[in-house]
Image: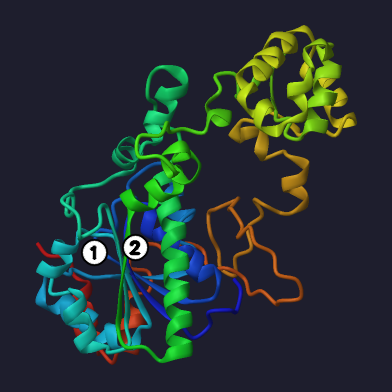
Amino acid sequence: MLPFLKGIRILDLTAVILGPYATQILGDFGAEVIKVEPLEGESMRPVPPIADGVSALVANNNRNKRSLALDLKSDAGREVLAKLIPTADVLVHNMRQDSMDRLGLSFEAAKELNPKLIYCAAVGFGAAGPYAGRPAYDDIIQSASGLAGLFGMRDGKPAITPNIIADKITGLTVVYAVLGALLNRERNGSAALYVEVPMYETMVAFLMNEHLAHATFEPDGAMGYHRVLARDRRPFQTKDGWIGVLPYSKENWARMLAIVNRTDIIGPWFESATERSKRMPELYSLIAEEFPRKSSAEWLTELEAADIPCSRVNTPKDLLEDPHLKAVGMFEANFGEATPAQRTLRFPITYRDVPKAPDRPAPRVGQHTEEILAELGYDADRIAMLMQPKK
């Protein structure tokens, strides 16, 4: 855990992946994160595998947090949150905004309690558009945003990428949205601020960066970055496996064509980056035709010697034994408390000469309820009542 956000308190009213992933990063930066969840725990807690009451998904998205279990549908639960909001710097939620409003937790209600609160709503679709309030999950946003359709442009049929990518990209956007708001408050002493981070718009902005293409300049211009949509720009099959290769510069391609004995195709067009770009499908096709003739090890040796970007295609299991990831401690646990997690995913950013404290493991549901309620001044009887599930 880094010390950069020490003294900043985040109220985390999020669940699933998007919000917890974002608030975990804020916790990695040193913020105090209080995860507010239902008495039975958030929706990812029952998803296996589970050890000591913590699922793998919760473990990997909720370190450096304390868990406060509350029934926010009850007056007593909302009373606790009303006491917490004035102590917080940031409130993050990923519910539909009308659900928050019905709970009495609208931005307007929150800023009455805390005139300097940064209120971050991670929603499916922006409030200003006709899709506002629609349910949104990762697969839906992959489909709506054009990501699934990009596979269709390349392969002839759309596909969902096997990664919760829309949640995590939106989660990263939440992080920099909150950090920007905190910096603004630090510099300008601003009043309460509402920050909306919609999944749909975030993913469209992320994906269309390169694929707006000719439509950037022409009303009916063709869309799609042809270099990345080439059918053969993908892992290449070798005699015994698969490797990824991406010749990029003119020099890379000259060496690549020499390795596959196809310098015969080089002509005047080769000197122009624009013309080479137009012929990418043909160039990738040449690689695809040649690579089955040799083993992965043989190709990697030749490509690395020629300084052409390449890699063996790893499976998730391969990554656990990857020598580089071992050297940087990517999966090493650094917890100051006991945890069933034998591996974790460390914060990937390194700051030189900055002291780090041990991380907190992801909490069990309600693990810190007593502690937090006592800090708010509740006595033992009241705490026991608040922790008691409804019958």
Task: Tell me which numbered mark, 2 or 1, is placed earlier along the sequence.
Answer: 1
**Residue under the point 74% across and 10% down:** 290
**Residue under the point 85% across and 31% down:** 304
Q: Amino acid at mark 2?
A: Val
Quadrant housing residue 233: top right
Query: In this rendering, does residue 226 appear at all?
Result: yes
Q: Report whether 286 appears left or right of 193.
A: right
**Residue under the point 73% across and 23% down:** 269
Q: Report whether 354 appears left or right of 145.
A: right
Q: Residue 388: x and y, percent?
A: 19, 70
Quarter the N terminus occupies? bottom right
Query: In this rendering, does residue 385 appear at all?
Result: no
Q: Amino acid at mark 1?
A: Leu
Question: Label 1 crowding class (10 Å Cα cut-off): few <14, some 14-19, many 20+?
Answer: some
Q: Residue 250: x and y, percent?
A: 78, 32
Quarter the C terminus occupies? bottom left
Depicted 357 relative to depicted 227: above or below:
below
Quadrant housing residue 310: top right
Of residues 124 and 287, the one nearer the viewer is: 287
Q: Are marks 2 and 1 in contact (CB under 8 Å)?
A: yes
Identify the residue position indicated by label 2 in the image.
365
